[in-house]
Structure formats: C-alpha cells, structure tokens
Image (cartoon, rainbow, N blue to C red):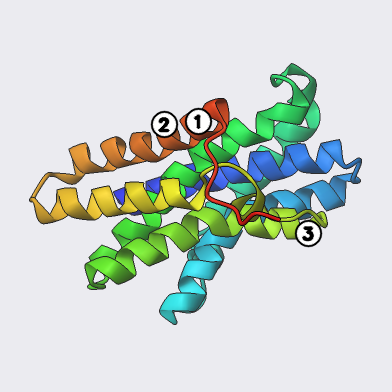
Amino acid sequence: MNIAVALDLVGTLVFALSGALVGVRRDLDLFGIAVLAVSAGTGGGGLRALLRGTAPPAALTNELYLPVALVAAGVGVFYHPRIAKLSSSVRPLDAVGLGFFAIAGTLKALDNGQDAVVAVLLGVLTGVGGGVIRDVLVAEVPVVLRQEIYALAALVGAAAFVALREAEVTKAIAVPASVALVVALRILAMRRNWQAPRPRR
C-alpha cells in the first residue's frame, strides 16, 4: 500500500465517522447512517477522480474503501455515546479528515504529473468534498461555506506540501508535517473563531 492510498483510507475512516455521527444526530435509520457515512468518506476522492477525468474512483477499484467506511459507520452507531459530546464531535473529526484528504489529493495529483497549482486545487477539493456531500444530504449549508477557516486551511497545507516536495523534502517528512499544518489551522480557527471576511449587511 502506497502512502497516498494510506492517507486516503485514513481520511475515509474519519469522514465516514463524521457522517455517521451526523446521521445519528439527525435520527436517521441504520441504512441512512450507512449511506451518509459512505458518501462522506468516499465523496472527496470521487470528486477528485471526476475532476481529473479518471474513472472509476479509487473507492470502486480498491476493495478496502467501502469496508473502512462501513466500519466507521458501525462505530458511530454503536459507540456514539462514548464519543465526546455528539453536538461538537463532528468538527474535530472534520479537521483531521480535512488534513488527510487534502494532502492525499495533492500527493496523488503530483504523482500523476499535475503541476503545482492543479495539485493544490485538487488537494483542496478532495479535502472539502466529503464534508460538502455529507452536509448537502442532510439539508445543511456546507461547513465550507458557513464556518471558520476551512478550505483555506486545506489550501495552506496543500501549498506547503507542494513547496516541501519542490524543495526535495522526503515524503516521510512532508506528508505528516503538511497534514499537521492543516489540522492545526482548522482547530485554531474553531477555537479562536477565525472567520473569512463577510460583507456588511
């Protein structure tokens, strides 16, 4: 298993768990929770494949993605009372999933010969895609459009990863450093309520 697939699978697990928790909070049945978890967990990678023109997405060609998402759904269903406050636990999970998916998308784009700008954009879209699909399915305004710094954290992390790789920093260092940067920025934004500028009404 290469490092990009490993990052993708961790992102799938985390976003699928966030989807399951949202499903539990919205009182969906087991099937609805599973659908929401799988959609959130695999949506970012599917969007990346669509934009790159590669078909089918990795979730349909690698037998690990669906079981990982379903395991996360089961964890969300059966252990949600033990997960820290249900109303707030989705957001830290989002931060972790955002970091893994953003860097996975950027890494895959670079490995496939995309230039730096395209790689960063694909990384950002991979990072935010699963959360957008999850929120749309439960009729919420996607978090990327309404809360603290979100896509910007993915953008900074993806750009940092590209810069590190162009400086010939090894993947073993560049990947965890960039993931940590995205997660740290997102969590700081949540705790300090950093907001993107909004127009005055």
Residue 5 appears in the rendering: no
The answer to which of 58 and 138 lies nearer the viewer is 138
In the picture of the structure, the residue carrying the numbered disc 2 is 184
- Marks 2 and 1 in Cβ contact (< 8 Å): yes
Amino acid type at image mark 2 = Ala
Q: At 57% across and 32% down in the image, what residue appears?
A: 193
Residue 17 on image: x %, y %: 66, 39
Amino acid type at image mark 1 = Ile
Using the numbered discs, state the Cα–Cα distance from disc 2 to disc 1 in whole angstroms: 5 Å
Question: Relative to 147, does residue 122 appear above or below in the rendering?
Answer: below
Using the numbered discs, state the Cα–Cα distance from disc 2 to disc 3 in whole angstroms: 27 Å
Q: Residues within 10 Å of mark 2 (few under 14, many from 20)?
A: some
Question: Relative to 189, does residue 149 appear above or below in the rendering?
Answer: below
Using the numbered discs, state the Cα–Cα distance from disc 1 to disc 3 in whole angstroms: 24 Å
At mark 3, the secondary structure is helix
| Mark seen at residue 137 | 3
In the picture of the structure, the residue carrying the numbered disc 1 is 187
| Mark seen at residue 36 | none
Of mark 2 and mark 3, the one earlier in the sequence is 3
